[in-house]
Image: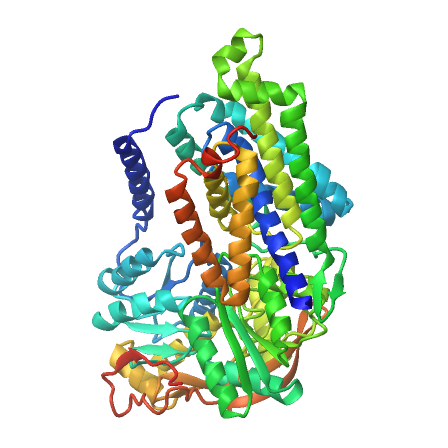
Amino acid sequence: MRSITRRKFLATSAASAAAITAAGFMGNVRIAHADDEIVIASLFDQSGGLDVYGTPMTMCTTLAVEEINAAGGLLGKKIRLISYDPQSNMELYAQYAQEAALKEKVAVVQGAITSASREVIRPILGENKTMLWYSVIYEGGVCDMNNVVSGATPLQMGDPVVEYGMKNYGKKVYYIGADYNAPQIIGDWGKKYVTEHGGEWLAKNLFPLDVTEFGPEISKIQAAKPDFLYTCLVGGAHISFYRQWAAAGMLKKIPMVSFTFGVGNEHKSLKPEECDGIVSAQPYFQELETPANIAFVKRFQDRFGGPDKAPYLNSVGSGSYIGTWFWAEAVKKAGTIEREAVLKALASGMSWEGPSGKLTVDPASMHCIQDVHLAKVEGGSWKVFQTINQLRPDDVKDRCDLTKNPATAEQFTPQL
Amino acid sequence: MDLIGIQIIQVLSGIATLALMGAGLAVIFGMMRVINFAHGEFMMLGGYVVIVCTEQFGINLWIAMLIIAPIFVGLVGLVFERILIRFLYGRMIDTLIATWGLSLFLIGVVTWIFGNVTRGVQTPLGAYSFGDYSEKVYTLVMIAFTVVIYLAIFIVLRRTKLGLIARGTMQNPNQASCLGVSPPRVYMVTFAVGAALTGLAGAILAPLNTVIPTIGVSYVAQAFITVITGGAAAFTGTVLASGVFGTVRQVISFEWTPILGQVFLLITAVILLRIFPTGITGRFFRRST
């Protein structure tokens, strides 16, 4: 057997690491700006672990741009969309955000999926005076004039679903989630709500994203005897939890409400017997039976290969459609693509009505006042049973007021 | 009392999961010294075989899991042994790079065919009650399968001529060759058996987890840590290491948090490898398999 020296090992591994990094820097040959077009960028992962979220988001952005162009464009110009693919890689997020802002000088970046990637590009785009529109449901608290958020916050999604649980199931709540900032903070918001409303917060247990073995946790939950379980699990590996929970016969014993269930199309991966009865509150469901949504779903499916091939739409995917259209309406109102003017138009309390209902910008936080729908999984699909109209994104109202302090650019977390 | 009972079952299940993940790697890495970075992807393939067989062809779950999955993944292993691995025996770091490539290739192919979509089969057999607690029957079945698989491995390696030839060839291919054995053929078959065991593990774990092209990363590190800590006598070592790690992880996960469970598993591994640099069986049970 040939021996391996440390030097040889280092050389070989360094060479392969370099090869992989180099692969990331290839690509993106583009034509220069023409005067009759407005360039915008989307930054959603279309490959790597997050492509389940990023691919429908890119499709929705594309659809919105095509619709705006078909309706005569924006300020008499066509929109050209540059769809970057950061490949679930934070370095590429930074690189593409810089490229979009400095080289392409885009009017807006529709971007970021996870909170981690948003926090990478938010300061870059802020420094380079390029507007960022974030349309994903998240842990709330970002207070930044340059970052318009149309995604829902814990106050808009978490509180209603916990309230539903406490009203219908009981006061003892057990929380499990994925181990990174968003589920961590969402859990803290949950704890705040539960303790302030006379409930008992039994536990907050977080799991690394690659954990697939939930046996001990399931026994532990049974030992704690909660009235209901509140979940914020994320990603493919964590779907195992729902499967193992059902297999242990728990689905009918302890009810479950969730912040994230369905956002990764979990109810499509699992069998109906494994997830029926789970309740979630989201700003958007494909099953919403409003005329605007039925028409939107049809346009989306017609554009992307029919009902069988087009991906299922949830609040994450549809978010970028809403974000792109809302931004375009703000440009129309402002009469220019200049960042300050567009932000001012939005901050005037501007509203827009899309497939998820009416959204209104709250000037204090640059988040959106919007409708939230409560739904239960039945036969593997969402059954919307209640709509709460026009919930305010007041999560950090006590600390964030951009009308008074427009220079704020930080993320606030719950004070327990 | 119920709590202790259910905890014992959880610990056994944790041990069985690790032992199952490590079985194929104990052959390919433990015996053959091939650093198989595509180990997780072989498991992933086993899971997909179960899904395709049960969903597309309506084949019985148990037949798909216990027969078709190991045969299919074994054949895949055989093909890659012929076109890739056989040139790399004895070049451990090169096998790492080559199988890393193989791992990316398999993820790519499966994503291309099935899409990056989470799939899965429902856990069969339902639940049983244990005092106040409710647990899935399948856990017990998985533990039983693991015991049977390891018994079979020990019997084949210790009690049959085939096992003797395999062990002899791995120890000293030149001597084996002098005695009329064809080492390349033995290597080929052994690699295929390792791949088949890996596919079987992936198939048995499929109804407990989800299957997605990238699920391999959830398995590969745990399998390597277990087999490396096990040491020279690959199978005895893997069983011992699974026993230690499974107990540590499940008990800590239960008492504190799953993150601490992972942390303590790794701390235990570091301590064990500091005390026994050549693995547990580098010190104890050296003459076992």
In which image quadrant can residue B240 be found? top right
Kindly identify the residue that appears in the image at 41 percent across and 79 percent down. A140
Query: In the image, A194: left or right of B132?
Result: left
- Residue A42 lies, in percent from the top left, at 38, 64
Number of numbered markers: 0
- Residue A136 lies, in percent from the top left, at 45, 72
Query: In the image, B192: left or right of A208?
Result: right
Q: Nearer the viewer, residue A372 or B2?
A: B2
Kindly identify the residue that appears in the image at 34 percent across and 25 percent down. A3
| Image quadrant occupied by the N terminus of chain B | bottom right
Measured along the vertical axis of the image, is residue A47 above or below residue A113? above
Q: Nearer the viewer, residue A241 or B68?
A: A241
Q: Nearer the viewer, residue A152 or B200?
A: B200
Measured along the vertical axis of the image, is residue A9 above or below residue B212? above
Is residue A115 among the parts visible in the rendering?
yes
- Residue A105 lies, in percent from the top left, at 25, 65
Colour scheme employed for the rendering of this structure? rainbow
The furthest residue to the front: B284
Is residue A353 among the parts visible in the rendering?
no
Measured along the vertical axis of the image, is residue A123 above or below residue A405? above
Kindly identify the residue that appears in the image at 32 percent across and 89 percent down. A399
| Image quadrant occupied by the C terminus of chain B | top right
In which image quadrant can residue B163 be found? top right
- Residue A317 lies, in percent from the top left, at 50, 68
Q: Nearer the viewer, residue B281 or A54?
A: B281
Kindly identify the residue that appears in the image at 30 percent across and 70 percent down. A122
